[in-house]
Image: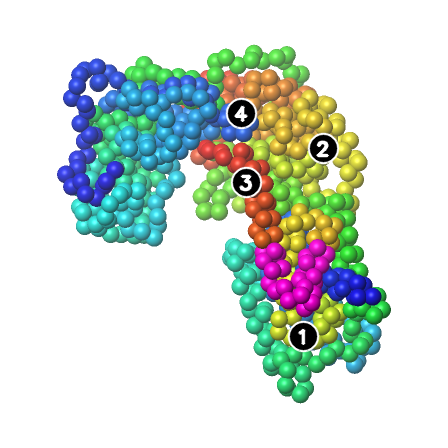
């Protein structure tokens, strides 16, 4: 891609092979049954996506569903474990993004990949070959900017630009590299509504001229209004692929959040006595470090033995869960919490366990901050043996390193550790994410058993089926507000969507 | 008897390496990259010399305790500068501690030519320490002093703390998984890492104080031939295990002493030993890096 010497570029995609209609039918990009594992975590499980020429294709899914991983594979940043990629009918095997760019693929990442100390023009020229000429590049940028309605000063240093301007620069740069297939990862997150309108108008024009676009987003509205086709990923699997006219918002939301083939609820749980209140929030207000309100006027109660589900889009509930687990302090309002709280965080390998240490040491890690003097390792070993037996953790023994365990067994171990002292409250974040069905069911049974023993359970899950199957009642958190929902998928889903926009 | 003398010399050389090695091992175990043992050792030596010279006439034999304690405090304060810079302004300790090494070295150089210079004002060093401020010799007829016993005791003590106490376990958890230590362990990791930093500085300061009170009996420039840097290799080769530090400290002590003897007796340049040392450091770092690379590659390669 020599961006500097080719003066007469256009925004329109490079002319298609004049050959035949057959070429027009050929999809621009076809990902076929792509699988990828990171360690024990299955990121993609035979995911497929077909991008029609001249179309805008929305790729939807919750956090961690595998959207970004799939697109990074298409862009040559990650190599898949299995599966195939065809670009314009030609089988490819990208070893690097440079090869993907040479095939006409451009990607705008969610995290900016710009050099702050360099100018706009220099950033656009990065990755090009030949002599760098500031004036030529600047003319190019101005021409692109005018075409797509995104004004940028080519000689401004990137560090002086706002997030919105940086996002525009990322898009302009992709156009400057003559991409005919554009991948945009959450492009609208930092744009103003007007810029968003302009962007979609330009994408539409780009597609009409024969280019094609993949739009990764979690904003259903953007996808429905602008895309021609849609693919939905959940837990690395492709759960829906369809032209956009054939689906509505409800179908998409349910596809993103829950499957229709989940295990039926097991035996009904005994009615709980709601009089023993374990958690009490009174008019709680929480601001994050950037002084953005994350929770407002929250008042709620959780009783012993109750399973309360929490539903939220894109981590909107993480502050509430942190407060509930005693890991965060409210900005104002009062919170009554029990002294013994178990916590199963979402990021298991980073926050719940120390992979390099043994199971015994990981048992001792719970309440390590409160321990004093000596550690009775003999006692901790006994506890570890019990956790391994009671929660059927598959491990070579208590002295095995945590990293030797599979994700499911790590999670069973964490749950066992957090429950070993019979805490009054257990807070869980996506406890079965990345686990197979058997491990997930085992976790579910243990959670219910703990509730039956009188532990109050607060469980956040991005899987609505899981929430519906487990919860006695559900709280929906959106934009810092909490609303109550009945524990079935339809009512949670509709409440989530109502409050989201 | 020459053999005993040579062995004693090697152990004398090993003592500061073991102590500074323990300082580095403690810091690294807790995830604090204190590369400033050299500077902390110099400040410990300077403080210890000052205390011994000023207080020896007033205090009698107990001055040695105060002098060693003062050295440890000085080392802790010197490390405390870097620890505060890290806590308040997120300054990388890898950079700040090395910079502080240079400041410490030149500060000592200034002291021995200025306020602390011996009365005749001829040599760039302090006056000699009174006998009461010197550590006792443990093998008569050699230079081997009680500092070695202190070093070994401290190593055993640290090993025991890591293995059996809650505080030691917290330090290990902090180094092995800071986020899990904070979230699952409910450990205040900012405070703990500050403490580890300062404790590490105290041990390095003690190394300097023992060097002055047991070997040189005066403060002068170049009192440390890079003990604080060799200590990094000592700690890494020991796998950050305090008991292992005793062995690797003695190994490096023997290597350096033997090199000096070889130069003296056979004219083999002692820089050969420095080269061997540097090579060992590189090989150790490469092995440690490779091990870390292999261990962390799989789980760390994660995307949103």
Circles 2 and 1, Cβ within 8 Å, touching? The answer is no
Label 2 neighbourhood size at 10 Å, few (<14), some (14-19), many (20+)?
A: some
Between B88 and A91, which is closer to the camera in this rendering?
A: A91
Which quadrant of the view contains residue A76? top left
Q: Which residue is mark 4?
A: A434
Question: Residues under labels 2 and 1: Cα distance?
Answer: 49 Å
* 3D distance between C-alphas at marks 4 and 2: 25 Å
Residue B277 among magenta residues: yes
Q: Secondary structure at mark 1?
A: loop
Q: Counting other residues with Cα less than 10 Å from the Cα at mark 3, is it few (<14), some (14-19), or many (20 or more)?
A: few
Q: Give whichever of A362, B287 is nearer the camera.
A: B287
- For the question of whether residue B264 can be seen, the reply is yes
What residue span does the magenta drawing correspond to?
Answer: B249-278
Residue marked by disc 1 = B219
Tell me residue B226's x, y (percent). 62, 64
Left or right: where A35 falls relative to A269: left
């Amino acid at each position: 891609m020599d961006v500097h010497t080719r003066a007469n570029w256009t925004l329109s995609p490079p002319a298609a092979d004049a050959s035949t209609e057959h070429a027009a039918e050929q999809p621009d990009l076809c990902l076929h049954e792509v699988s990828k594992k990171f360690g024990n975590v299955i990121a993609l499980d035979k995911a497929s996506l077909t991008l029609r020429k001249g179309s805008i294709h929305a790729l939807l899914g919750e956090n961690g569903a595998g959207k970004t991983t799939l697109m990074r594979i298409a862009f040559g940043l990650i190599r898949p474990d299995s599966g195939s990629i065809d670009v314009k009918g030609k089988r490819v095997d990208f070893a690097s993004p440079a090869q993907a760019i040479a095939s006409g693929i451009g990607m705008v990442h969610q995290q900016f990949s710009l050099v702050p100390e360099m100018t706009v023009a220099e950033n656009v020229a990065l990755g090009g070959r030949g002599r760098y000429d500031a004036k030529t590049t600047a003319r190019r940028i101005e021409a692109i900017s005018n075409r797509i309605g995104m004004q940028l000063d080519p000689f401004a240093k990137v560090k002086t630009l706002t997030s919105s301007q940086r996002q525009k620069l990322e898009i302009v740069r992709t156009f400057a590299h003559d991409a005919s297939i554009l991948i945009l990862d959450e492009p609208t997150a930092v744009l103003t509504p007007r810029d968003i309108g302009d962007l979609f108008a330009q994408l539409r024009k780009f597609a009409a001229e024969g280019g094609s676009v993949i739009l990764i987003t979690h904003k259903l509205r953007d996808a429905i209004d602008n895309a021609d086709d849609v693919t939905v990923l959940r837990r690395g699997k492709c759960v829906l692929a369809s032209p956009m006219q054939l689906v509505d918002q409800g179908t998409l939301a349910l596809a993103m959040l829950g499957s229709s083939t989940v295990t039926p609820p097991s035996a009904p749980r005994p009615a709980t006595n709601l009089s023993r209140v374990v958690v009490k929030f009174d008019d709680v207000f929480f601001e994050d470090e950037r002084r953005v309100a994350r929770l407002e006027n929250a008042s709620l109660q959780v009783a012993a033995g109750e399973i309360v589900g929490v539903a939220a889009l894109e981590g909107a509930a993480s502050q509430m869960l942190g407060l509930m687990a005693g890991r965060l302090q409210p900005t104002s309002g009062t919170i009554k919490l029990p002294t013994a709280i178990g916590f199963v965080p979402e990021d298991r390998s980073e926050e719940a366990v120390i992979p390099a240490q043994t199971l015994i040491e990981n048992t001792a890690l719970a309440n390590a901050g409160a321990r004093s003097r000596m550690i009775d390792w003999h006692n901790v070993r006994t506890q570890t043996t019990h956790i391994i037996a009671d929660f059927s953790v598959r491990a070579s023994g208590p002295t095995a390193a945590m990293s030797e365990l599979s994700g499911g067994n790590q999670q069973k171990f964490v749950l066992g550790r957090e429950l070993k002292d019979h805490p009054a409250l257990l807070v869980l974040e996506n406890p079965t994410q990345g686990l197979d069905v058997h491990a997930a069911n085992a976790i579910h049974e243990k959670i219910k058993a703990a509730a039956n023993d009188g532990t109050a359970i607060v469980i956040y899950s991005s899987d609505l089926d899981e929430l519906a199957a487990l919860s006695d009642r559900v709280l929906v958190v959106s934009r810092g507000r909490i609303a109550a929902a009945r524990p079935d998928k339809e009512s949670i889903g509709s409440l989530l969507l109502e409050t989201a926009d | 008897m020459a053999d005993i003398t040579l062995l004693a010399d090697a152990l004398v050389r090993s003592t500061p390496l073991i102590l500074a090695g323990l300082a580095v091992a403690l810091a690294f175990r807790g995830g604090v990259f204190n590369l400033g043992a050299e500077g902390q050792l110099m400040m410990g030596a300077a403080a210890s010399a000052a205390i011994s010279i000023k207080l020896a006439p007033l205090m009698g034999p107990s001055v040695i305790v105060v002098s060693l304690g003062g050295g440890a405090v000085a080392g802790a304060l010197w490390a405390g500068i870097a620890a505060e810079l890290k806590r308040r302004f997120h300054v990388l300790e890898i950079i700040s501690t090395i910079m502080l090494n240079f400041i410490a070295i030149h500060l000592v150089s200034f002291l021995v030519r200025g306020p602390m210079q011996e009365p005749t004002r001829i040599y760039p060093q302090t006056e000699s320490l009174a006998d009461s401020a010197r550590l006792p010799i443990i093998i008569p007829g050699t230079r081997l002093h009680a500092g070695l016993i202190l070093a070994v005791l401290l190593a055993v003590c640290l090993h025991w703390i890591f293995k059996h106490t809650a505080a030691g376990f917290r330090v290990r958890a902090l180094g092995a998984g800071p986020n899990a230590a904070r979230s699952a362990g409910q450990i205040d990791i900012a405070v703990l890492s500050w403490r580890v930093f300062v404790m590490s500085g105290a041990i390095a300061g003690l190394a300097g104080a023992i060097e002055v009170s047991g070997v040189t009996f005066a403060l002068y420039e170049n009192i440390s031939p890079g003990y604080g840097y060799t200590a990094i290799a000592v700690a890494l080769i020991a796998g950050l295990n305090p008991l292992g530090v005793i062995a690797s400290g003695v190994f490096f002590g023997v290597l350096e002493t033997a090199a000096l003897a070889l130069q003296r007796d056979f004219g083999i340049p002692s820089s050969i030993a420095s080269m061997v040392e540097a090579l060992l450091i590189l090989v150790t770092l490469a092995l440690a890096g490779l091990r870390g690379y292999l261990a962390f590659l799989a789980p760390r390669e994660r995307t949103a």
